[in-house]
Image: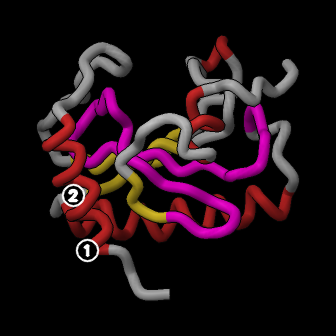
């Protein structure tokens, strides 16, 4: 599949679409999933054009994974989570719906089930508050 520079994540990178940003550097961006499966559901993406895990240069994948780990630490702390699930879906058959490589970071609590993904858009105020909690919990560089 050829990369589509008009996908929503590419637009977020270019500030052409809104997002509740949690972390950003020269090569990566982390922001709140607008249709979260759990409170605190955060996405981490490389800024380079990559459809999926098979399409990303190794050095960008390395940086993206390092930022994913950093965001996971903050998400676990900000939401007092028992654990954190990191998921990456590559290809439509795997459930990928936005064809820009991304990692889902989801805080997990015993006994709390996921909401359906891509069903309900969370209120802006909730996403803003969750993003702020995660930013405050980010470990120092």
* Mark drawn on residue 82: 2
Residue 59 coordinates in the image, percent (x, y): 83, 64
> Residue 45, position in %: x, y?
60, 48
Residue toward you, 82 or 92: 92
Count up the numbered dots: 2
Q: Earlier in the sequence, mark 2 or mark 1?
A: 2
Q: Are marks 2 and 1 in contact (CB under 8 Å)?
A: no
Residue 26: within the magenta? yes
Secondary element at tag 2: loop
- For label 1, the SS is helix
Q: Main secondary structure of the magenta part?
A: loop
Q: Is residue 87 left or right of residue 114?
A: right
Q: Which mark is residue 136?
A: 1
Magenta segment boundaries in residue numbering: 24-52
Q: Residues under labels 2 and 1: Cα distance?
A: 19 Å
Q: Does residue 23 lie above or below 19 as drawn? A: below
Mark 2, residues whose alpha carbon is within 10 Å: few (<14), some, or many (≥20)?
few
Q: Nearer the viewer, mark 2 or mark 1?
A: 1
Q: Residue at x 16, y 63 (%)?
A: 80
Residue at x-position 36% and y-position 75%: 138
**6 to the left or right of 8:** right
């Amino acid at each position: 599949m050829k990369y589509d520079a008009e996908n929503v994540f590419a637009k977020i990178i270019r500030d052409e679409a809104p997002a509740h940003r949690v972390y950003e550097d020269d090569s990566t961006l982390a922001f709140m999933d607008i249709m979260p499966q759990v409170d605190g559901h955060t996405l981490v993406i490389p800024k380079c054009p990559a459809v999926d895990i098979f399409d990303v240069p190794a050095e960008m994948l390395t940086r993206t994974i390092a930022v994913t780990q950093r965001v996971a630490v903050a998400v676990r702390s900000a939401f007092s989570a028992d654990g954190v699930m990191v998921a990456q879906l590559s290809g439509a058959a795997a459930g990928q719906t936005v064809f820009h490589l991304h990692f889902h970071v989801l805080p997990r609590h015993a006994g709390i089930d996921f909401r359906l993904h891509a069903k309900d858009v969370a209120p802006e105020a909730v996403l803003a508050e969750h993003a702020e909690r995660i930013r405050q919990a980010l470990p120092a560089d």
